[in-house]
Image: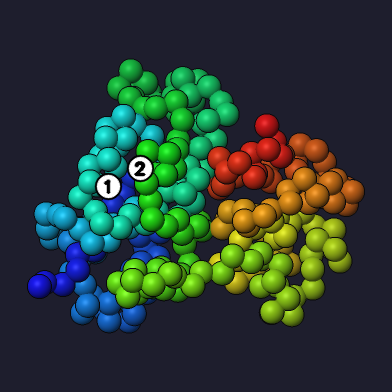
Amino acid sequence: MGKPKLAVWKFASCDGCQLSILDCEDELLAITEAIEVANFAEMTRKTLDGPYDISLVEGSITTAEDAQRIVDIRKASQTVIAIGACATAGGIQALRNYADVGEYITAVYAHPEYISTLTTSRPISDFIKVELELHGCPVNKEHLIEVIVATLAQRKPRIPRFSVCEECKMKGNTCVLVADKLPCLGPVTSAGCGALCPSISRGCYGCFGPTEKANTASLSAQLRKNGTSDSKVKRMFKTFNANTKEFEREFS
């Protein structure tokens, strides 16, 4: 029996999550001894036919062609894992879901007649079944390694589901929301970045998406109490993970 096959697929995205895989460096070298990389454009030109044991999918679905391509990938894969904000929530490009796409195309492209796109940007799970979603913009490389290793070992990955606030407490950070009255999404955002922004006295931007039981209404009320304008509160939730139901209800 040969090595398990790993494939990495790109849809509408900036490639940041694929680069996070390459950032694993030494760990990735160890993993490639146990698996065969069958498709990974950022890493190698070599491609192998399926079936694939693990497919990591980056990016959202924004065209009819991609909607069909992800179905084909699902058929060829034993395990499909959506990685990053684009694949799990539609990404920053999901802002098109709340605007006139035709107007955007006309404003951006010199020849809009050549553009063929869906009116929405949707996560992978809207089109196929996925075994796991790994959030982040970009994803945490340690989380990626854990997911790949756990999948190969046929066990449940140990990915933290607590909020950024707990990461702040573990680092001994002063709360920017309470002490400085700065706008911060930390209480409703999943951990994974190591409290990167609060550690340099900036509020959390919500890159890792909502926690499992995000009380966004309570946070919105606190932000307004702190003096954040209603329009700014709405903009805070309307970023990388706007298309999640938890964040969307705060600006829709």
Q: Quadrant of the N terminus?
A: bottom left
Q: In percent of the image, x 32 and y 35: which residue is there? A: 67
Q: Residues within 10 Å of mark 2 (few under 14, many from 20)?
A: some
Tell me the element at label 2: loop
Residue 251, picture quadrant:
top right
> Is 54 placed above or below 33 here?
above
> Is 135 placed above or below 61 here?
below
219 vs 171, nearest the viewer? 219
Q: Which residue is disc 1 drawn over?
A: 74
Residue 128, picture quadrant:
top left
Q: Which residue is disc 2 drawn over?
A: 128
Tell me the element at label 1: helix
Q: In percent of the image, x 80 and y 38: which residue is there? A: 230
Q: Are marks 2 and 1 in contact (CB under 8 Å)?
A: yes
> Is 75 placed above or below 29 here?
above
Residue 204: x %, y % from top left: 67, 59
